[in-house]
Amino acid sequence: MRVLEPPDTHFVNAAQGWLDLSNPREAREELKRVSTAAGNLPEVIEVRWQICALEQDWTSALALARELIRRAPQQPGGWLNQSYSLHEMKRTQEAWDFLRPLVKRFPKNCTVAYNLACYACQLGDLQEAKEWFHRALDLRGKEEIKKMGLHDADLLPLREYIQAL
């Protein structure tokens, strides 16, 4: 498999920097400088997905997530991006259905558990949401996940429960 090399690494890093500054337009300009050969590498597709996510272009984001899955199925990023895109498109049941089987594939991935907690909560299954939230706590650490959960709109129905943890 081809790896990202200079100068393409510099363009991808610069694009990521622009994303950190919430500037998707400049990030997109940096990615235009990436060589054609590197344009379909997972690292580049991931940044393109981040640009679409920042712009809330969830249809394009979903297509990029699926491309990332096709090119790097062994990495959780594409799968997580796919489910998140679906959730943002108000297709939360699909997001759940796609992400739930990945627990066996990525059992130590905290984001899988955390996102499942969010989706279960939004689907109205608060007991299931609590179980996935606790799994995320176990994987990453109580303080970090609790802080995230208290500020996550998807977990609003569990706010009091999370505060009491």
Image (tube, helix red, strand yellow):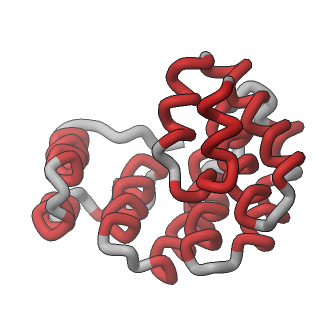
Up/down of 129 relative to 133, above or below? below
Question: Left or right of 24: which side holds 141?
Answer: right
Residue in front for this viewpoint, 85 or 150: 150
Q: Position of residue 100 (x, y in %)?
A: 84, 52
Question: Left or right of 70: which side holds 14?
Answer: left
Instruction: Give the residue at x 74% y 57%.
Output: 121
Looking at the rendering, which quadrant does residue 75 occupy? top right
Q: Can you see residue 115?
A: yes
> Which quarter of the rendering shows the C terminus?
top right
Question: Left or right of 37: which side holds 95?
Answer: right
Residue in front for this viewpoint, 30 or 141: 141
Instruction: Give the residue at x 51% y 23%.
Output: 144
Question: Left or right of 36: which side holds 118?
Answer: right
Q: Position of residue 59 (x, y in %)?
A: 51, 82
> Which quarter of the rendering shows the N terminus?
top right
Instruction: Give the residue at x 77% y 35%.
Output: 106
Q: Position of residue 57 (x, y in %)?
A: 40, 79
Instruction: Give the residue at x 42% y 63%.
Output: 49
Q: Position of residue 91 (x, y in %)?
A: 69, 78
Up/down of 75 relative to 144, above or below? below
Looking at the rendering, which quadrant does residue 44 occupy? bottom left
**Tag count in the figure?**
0
Q: Can you see residue 79?
A: no
